[in-house]
Amino acid sequence: MESLWVLAIATLVLFVPGAIVLLAARVRRASWIAGVAPPISCGIASLTAMGCALIGVPFGPVPLCVVVGLVALVGVGVWWRSPREPSTGPRRRPVELVGAVCGVVLVVGAIAAGTRSWLAGMGSLRTVPQEHDMVVHTTLTAFIERTGRGAPWQLLPADLLTGAPAQPYPAGLHLLSAIVARCAGDAVVGLNAVAVVVCAVVWPVSVATLGVMAARRARMGFGIAMVAGGMAAVVAIGLQQPMFLLNHVGGMLPNATALAMAPGILTVLVTMAPAVGPVLVAGLACAGAVAVHPSAGVTVGVSVVAWCAGELFTRGGAGFAKDRVRAVGAAVVVAAVMSLPGLAAVLSQRATVTTFPSEKPPESVTQAMGRVFAVPYDGFPGDVVPLGSGQFAVMLLLLAGLVAILVRGGPWGLVAAWGAWAVVVVAMYVSPGRGWEAGITRYFYNATFRISSHLNLFVPVIAALGVVFTAAVVARRLPRLPSLRPSAGRWAAVGLVMVLAAVYGMAVLPGYLRIAQSTVASRFSSPTPYVRVSPDDLAAIRWLAPRVLPGQRVLNSANDGSTYLYVLGGVPVVNVLTLGAAAWPPSYALLEDFNRYRTESDIRRALTDLDVAWIYVDTKTPTISSAGAPENWVSAPSFGLAPGLLNLEALPEVRPAFRSGTVAVYSVDLNAIRALDAGPPAGRPPVVVNSTR
């Protein structure tokens, strides 16, 4: 029961601020409100956090509610002063209204199925996540919730005690997670709830809006277009990529969120008029997505350009493209202005992102083409994911959809957007990070997982249109029967799509979601063999947290469960990034050389200056890549246990204080360490430590 009310709060936090902004701008399209309310909410939260920082007020639920309330008041004034516009559109036929209801039912069903899989895989919203990037996400959420600091220039703090220096990190989603955390009383619960809502609600709703728009561009009626959107949502919720995969292979929640928002934003950019209201809300939506993850600019930009290029092959395509240049160009200007403070900070770190090596070796063109059409499962060897197999039913629907679109003659914009990313995916797998496509892939860490996930922004819509177009062709023959009314074909088309959706939902989707649930569980409720935060970590945290005095820090490696000392107990740890913070050299210097403090004065000075009174060590840690280590201090290609935390029992100033399994806590005698600067203590020779360096 607790999970449901927290999820309800997370849903409200993600959708309500954006919906109020859209209504204030006199946006009446329900698809716009559903599709871009979440990124606009992130944009509003980011602007609010910057305003709070400038006037010295902590960011939290109250300032956000005040800002949203002011927007609502402005909206009331706008609606009051605006002339009443009589409805000029035709009245909806009963079949269209029923189709709309059926589409909503399919979307709700997709949301329910996805939510069930995520919650079952997590076990509970209180379950601590195990993946690498979640170390940062939970810490950042806790920091914002505890301190009220949420402006781009305040995040991510390398030193949790002082809040400085800041390591630029996009935090549009973490701001809303911190709001939910404040309401739930727990940062882990807040972040997990937002993750579930993004992956199980925002994602299918966003895809559904794109499906409705694509069907309307293909000259389908309102009712059948709504059913197409619902079918797209049903297909989307069962796909491994991007939601389940990106959260599984690295905890890439912000990138997954930006991809979840992209279809809704694309819907607005393709359909908006070049007027002030639409331009402002589209610009704010783009700015919100960029605040979540700057790569959203590339995702949306490439997709919009490709869509417009495809529309050139339709009647009136040149005029459409011209209108898009004006409208989208204005929205981009608005987004750039709103995103400037955050981008200025993040772009200073662009070299760290763009120079990452790809995680996979080159493949043949045939193998790469298979990744485009076969909708394969992806992941790392040894995972629960069935590598080597694909989502066969989705592949058939994709191929059928491409054929149906070819026969019908559109929408070419949709095919062009999918095709553009397909070309990028093939090129990347053939020459990862080295070919022409690196101009795009470098903004995604040259990671094949992140790039290939872009295909599935469009696969559900293509698959849904294949079902709808086929149903329409079959149903079109019914009115020729003298005993049937002319509207029978439209009713039959809606009914046939619902039957096919029910068959897919009962025969295919449960199998996909069982694999998805196992995928989630392997990083939450059943983290075997991948464990970063174990019961031993939680026991150590419970013991140590009440013993750390104000002003003291705990030396740790963020590649274990030690960061949850801060997340759960508010205890400042030295390291919040697994390889140390480039902006704060003591963080990685201590990881490398702490056990040499008896011979290195710089290490002693760092310990005493930071008041490091405790050390937290877990000898069983996950193995991660050392790419991106500051000053390349890790000599090996992989990293597990920090060399500076080895052999601590041999150090006389460091004493064991607690042990549970592989986790040990040591107390540090800082007075004795200070005395080393006056020479070795009488009767105690210097200690030589055999540290791997």
Image (cartoon, rainbow, N blue to C red):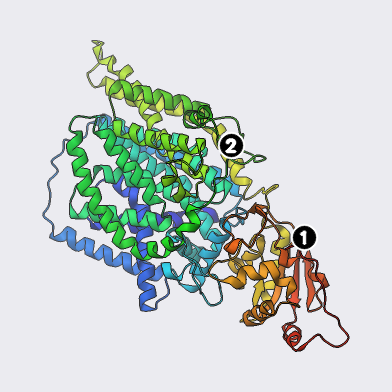
- Are the residues tagged 2 and 1 within 8 Å (C-beta)? no
Can you tell which quarter of the image residue 339 is in? bottom left
Q: Is residue 569 something that shows in the picture?
A: no
Q: From the viewer's perspective, is residue 74 above or below residue 602?
A: above
- Residue farthest toward the right in the current orientation of the protein: 683
State the image quarter where residue 307 is shown.
Answer: top left
Count of numbered marks = 2
Q: Amino acid at mark 1?
A: Thr
Camera-side residue: 283 or 517? 283
Question: Which is more toward the observer, 250 or 46?
Answer: 250
Report the residue at 22% width, 30% height from top. 314
458 vs 537, nearest the viewer: 458
Q: Secondary structure at mark 2?
A: helix
Disc with the residue nearer the chain's start (2 vs 1): 2
Closer to the eye: label 2 or 1: 1
Percent position of residue 55, x then y: 35, 78
- Residue 594 location (% of width, % of height): 71, 72
User: Could you tell whether 210 is left or right of 352 in the image?
Assistant: left
Instruction: Give the crowd class for mark 2: few <14, some 14-19, many >=20 residues within 10 Å.
Output: some
Q: Which circle marks residue 167 in the picture?
A: none
Q: Name the residue type under label 2.
A: Arg
Density class for disc 1 (Cα within 10 Å; few <14, some 14-19, many ≥20) is: few
Q: On residue 514, which mark appears?
A: 2
Q: Pinpoint residue 10: horizontal percent, then vertical percent.
A: 45, 56
Q: Is residue 501 left or right of residue 575?
A: left
Q: Secondary structure at mark 1?
A: loop
Image height check: is 366 above or below 562?
above
What is the spatial separation of the Cα atoms under label 2 and label 1, in whole angstroms?
33 Å
Q: Is residue 424 visible?
A: yes
Disc marking residue 662 = 1
